[in-house]
Image (cartoon, grey):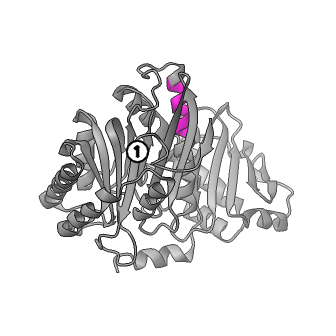
Amino acid sequence: MQYIEGGVTAAKGFSASAAAAGIKYKDRTDMALVYSETPCVSAGTFTSNVVKAAPVVWDRDKVYHAPFCQAIVCNSGIANACTGEEGMSYCLATAKAAGKLLDIPEDAVLVASTGVIGMQLKMDRIAAGLELLVPALGSSIDHGHQAARAIMTTDTKPKEVAVSLEIGGRQVVIGGMCKGSGMIHPNMCTMLAFITTDAAISHEMLQAALSEDIRDTFNMVSVDGDTSTNDTVLLLANGQAGNPVIDAKNADYQAFAAGLRMVTEKLCKMIAGDGEGATALLEVKVVGAESKAQAVTLAKSVVTSSLVKTAIAGHDANWGRILCAMGYSGASFDPEQVDLFFESAAGRIQIMKSGIAADYSEDEATRILSEPEITVTADVKMGQAEATAWGCDLTYDYVRINADYRS
């Protein structure tokens, strides 16, 4: 099992394209299409926010009830959220237009949107964008890369990854792309993510693998504590690898789940590290917990703390903020037993031992915290369970970006 170059076009039978439709942005591509040459089994997970964007409602219905799915159309700039019946009609119109151009049923077309909430889509531009997207489809790595760029909003870089593994004596590929920089908080998944695979797997097992995976990946990411109205992860499997169909939780299922984890964890780190205004990826590991639930609660509380995030931005080893965030998390533990460590490419340092300050160098701690990827490890010494959460520092630029977002 290994990482390979590419994203959504890495798996057999998948193609992608990008187009500049002028939906909101005037200086970039803003529509993407992902297409499988054969019908796909699909799986999805969606926002837990009570306010759900129209594409979330559309996709949830198609993933759970349509006979198959074969294409994903995504636009950036306008979220198609809080748009009422008109917004739902745009999903149908988009699916109809794409289905006609691709010669597939409208129910086989999934749609996704990201951007400003409350604005109505410009359907003439969506339709014109589709006219550009379909003839531009291609299966090269660059086609996938361009699609990943087209779904960006405040992201500073495209996010894509692919892995190759062996299942049932056949080579299987899983590839994905995502977008997410702001309005990111763990509560299902935390942005738009599209994952493709040529594995042969049943609908039930594909959904099980995705639902189990997000608990430890997308649900463990936070940039700013806001759960989006549009959060969606879509996973399409077209079976072209030719492996024996995975229809039970056997060794082949476990291998597929491990490959999926490699893809989703990498995407999660890309999102956290590219948080709006961020200068550092913050990874928080809680080890020695008495239960997974306790570890998850503690890790999330630390990674979402504004005071911890600003300390990381200032390269300040203010460990009291970490212990404070653990203390108000709601999880029970003995603070006098906790050990804390900071780690980065510059080294590892213990800053707290059994609940009190360790004998450490502030200069060394600052040097470690000045790296672009930082890990905080908290050992609560209560058991064997552990959990990891990902976030980022909080800088002045976060306020600037979001103060100007609609303009």
Identify the residue at image location x=19%, y=46%: 106
In the image, is residue 149 above or below residue 405?
A: above
Query: What residue is pinned by disc 1?
Result: 14
Task: Determine crowd level at label 1: few under 14, some 14-19, many 20+ residues with C-alpha closer than 10 A.
Answer: many
Q: What SS does tag 1 mark?
A: strand
**Bounds of the magenta span?**
253-261
Going by the numbered disc 1, the residue's amino acid type is Phe
Q: The C terminus appears in which quarter of the rendering? A: bottom left
| Residue that appears at 68% across and 64% down | 372
Residue 80 visible, this orientation: no
Q: Position of residue 353 (x, y in %)?
A: 79, 48
Query: In percent of the image, x 35 and y 75: which residue is there?
Result: 25
- Say if 227 sits above or below 28 in the image: above
How many dots with numbers? 1
**Would you say residue 226 is visible in this rendering?**
yes
Residue 255 is one of the magenta-drawn residues: yes
Q: Nearer the viewer, residue 148 or 190?
A: 148
**Quadrant placement of the N terminus:** top right
Q: Is residue 247 left or right of residue 278?
A: left
Q: Position of residue 225 (x, y in %)?
A: 46, 59
Q: Is residue 30 magenta?
A: no
Residue 388: % across, % down: 60, 45
Please provide percent x and percent y for residue 53: 26, 56
Q: Using the rendered view, name the quadrant where residue 38 is placed.
A: top left
Q: Residue at x 12, y 57 (%)?
A: 85
Which SS does the magenta portion mostly show? helix
